[in-house]
Image (cartoon, coloured by chain):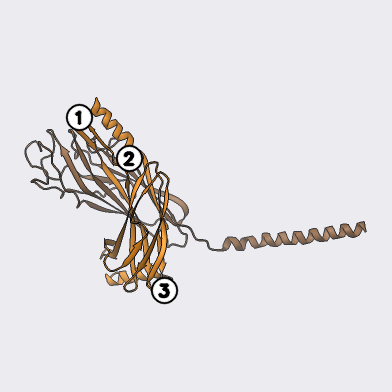
Amino acid sequence: MKRIGMLLVVVLALFVNAGLAQTIYAAPAVLNTTFTVQESLALSVANSTLDLTKTPGSAGNNATITLSYNLNPSRPNTQNVSLQVYLTDATAALTGAGLPNIPGTSLVPALSGGPDPTQTINFSDCGTTGPDGWVATAGGPTSANSMDCSRGYVRYSVWHLTPGLQNTTWAFNLGFKAGTTPTTAGSWSGTVNVIAEIGL
Amino acid sequence: MKSLLGIAMLLTLSTFVSAQKISPLEAEYGRGKASGEFYVENLSLSPMAVTIEPKGFAMNANGKMDTFDLKDVKFKLSEMSMKLGPLEKHTVYYDVACPSTPCHLAFYARFVPAKRVKLDIGDKHFEGVTIAVHLPYVIYVCEKAKNCEVETKEAMRKSVGLN
């Protein structure tokens, strides 16, 4: 009776072992199945408010924009993400001497970093002489002025992102070129719009 | 001294890392209608104001997409604007009806800080230039959902003489 019992335990163990073996054998089939990634895109901005009265290149005058994404592996590897950057509703209220007296030339932000650092946003056409723009007088404006910079625009493309589960980042630096920002007292306000394009 | 203090406060308040997220990125639908959801997330530690902006888009001669205000496509959104607290995530539901197929559109989520940094000290006024982040969620609608995006983009390329 005891031997029969032991035999049953051995047979049961063999069944269990066979079952486990089958489970382990089936595992690669599970790994081969396609799974869908919840795709996402994130932009992070360190220093989300620019202080244009600061010296160009110094803290407060530039912002680093980081693009993070998580793309499905089934996407073609030619998938691209573009960033459009433009400035809207910029106004300036500046006083003092030393301001540039040519309309619009005082505000030329630049994008740097990423695969092509040569592109710049050129707002040279923003602002006109007259009540809504810079007053072109020697020594610059002497009273509060505003300007319309809604036309500044650049499209900055990042090509060939590698799809996958990993997060990859591209860092951009948004700042203002040296020698183009007024350093006298005053204030600037407005919005720099950073627009991501993916899937379009 | 007060001016320096104001500028220091402005810089301190503005140096928070402000990350914003949208997911998923796109969806394909058939039968001329779309109904679904996407979520927006504020990954920063300060509140953000979010506005959903519907946009149409078309390929230009250089193969890039140009966006424009939406005209013919009818849509409903559960919300057009919202305020997201720190680390808050919010789902937006939509219904889209296209006048004809194929059609496509994008819902852009525009994130800006809920409170702009403003400081008035004496006769000095400190206000910086805010950076707004726009993230897209793209919808493609065809007669059949499968390969709708690829077929739509191929048709666009042909229409502008590319390929």
Q: Do residues under tags 2 and 1 come within 8 Å of each other at their CB atoms? A: no
User: What's the mark number on residue A47?
Assistant: 2
Q: Colour of chain B?
A: orange
Label 2 element class = loop
Identity of the residue drawn at 65% across and 63% down: A26
Q: Which residue is mark 1?
A: B122
Q: Position of residue B25 (x, y in %)?
A: 40, 59
Residue nearer the viewer, B40 or A69: B40
Up the image or down, A116 lies above or below B143; here it is above
Label 1 element class = loop
Residue type at numbered disc 1: Gly
Q: Residue furthest front?
A: B78
Q: Residues within 10 Å of mark 1 (few under 14, many from 20)?
A: few
Report how far apart the C-alphas of labels 2 and 3 lie in the structure: 45 Å
Report how far apart the C-alphas of labels 2 and 1 lie in the structure: 25 Å
Chain identity of mark 2:
A
Residue nearer the viewer, B31 or B90: B90
Residue nearer the viewer, A157 or B97: B97
Point out the image quarter for the C terminus of chain A: bottom left
Q: Is residue B26 visible?
A: yes
Identity of the residue drawn at 31% across and 67% down: B74
Residue type at numbered disc 3: Lys
Q: Position of residue A131 (x, y in %)?
A: 9, 45
Up the image or down, A80 lies above or below A88; here it is below
Q: Is A195 on the left or on the right of B37, as rendered? A: left
Q: Is residue A157 visible?
A: no
Q: Residues within 10 Å of mark 3 (few under 14, many from 20)?
A: some
Residue type at numbered disc 2: Asn
Q: Do residues under tags 1 and 3 come within 8 Å of each other at their CB atoms? A: no
Q: Colour of chain A?
A: brown
- N-terminal label among 1 and 3: 1
Chain identity of mark 3:
B
